[in-house]
Amino acid sequence: MSPKSKIPSLITLSRLMLSPAIVYTYLNGEYMISLLIFVFAACTDFFDGYIAREMDSETDSGAFLDVLSDFILIISCFSAFIARDLYNPLILVLIILMFAIFMATSNFNKPIYDPVGKYLGSYLMLMIIVTFLFPGTDIIGPLQLSFVLFCIVSITSRLVFLGKSVNA
């Protein structure tokens, strides 16, 4: 690994290391601090990819680390929300399932394009921000329901594109 390819990976690793801090501050009632740490972590998600492209140092291992860091960040936040009884614990099962589907279909010789699923991670990030801003409000129920519907549409979309690539 060249020195310049380490910079984006270090930025990505910082996101990974911030996940426990978000959980700790959230579970200790420091919601705004949790939100600020999360926003900073989300910014690293943009900058690691941007810097990797600008420095022409994109790697498969860096891309995998990026996805893994996003997954751990999201799982950490929802684990904290579940610990505070804001979300149904089954939401974690659905998040893990969607991540597994993404990983499985991304490793095909020809990755399965999912025009809906590519926005799923962004929606999860939005859910996290809204939950930090409005914990314990009536908005959590509609957020959960819309996430379930989003997942159903995403899975259907992947199956349609999978069927098209098999028949092609």
Image (cartoon, rainbow, N blue to C red):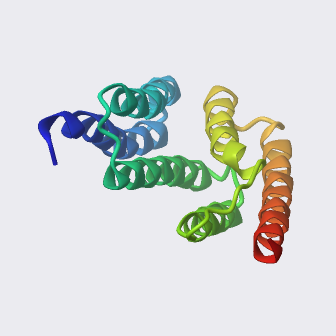
**81, 109: nearer the viewer:** 109
Name the residue rendered at 51%, 27% in the picture. 35
Judge left or right: residue 119 versus residue 24: right
**127, 26: nearer the viewer:** 127
The answer to whether residue 30 is seen in the rendering is no
Name the residue rendered at 47%, 43% in the picture. 27
Judge left or right: residue 143 versus residue 130: right
Quarter of the image with the C terminus in it: bottom right
Residue situated furthest front in the rendering:
168
Residue situated furthest left in the rendering:
3
Name the residue rendered at 48%, 47% in the picture. 70
Residue 108 in percent (x, y) is at 57, 70
Residue 44 in percent (x, y) is at 40, 30
Work out whether 74 lies above or below 107.
above
**147, 134: nearer the viewer:** 147
Name the residue rendered at 53%, 48% in the picture. 74
Residue situated furthest bottom in the rendering:
166
The answer to whether residue 90 is seen in the rendering is yes
Work out whether 145 lies above or below 136.
below
Tell me the quarter of the picture where residue 12 sits.
Answer: top left
How many numbered markers are drawn? Answer: 0
Residue 89 in percent (x, y) is at 66, 64
Judge left or right: residue 62 versus residue 27: left
Tell me the quarter of the picture where residue 96 sits.
Answer: bottom right
Work out whether 17 lies above or below 137.
below
Judge left or right: residue 131 versus residue 163: left
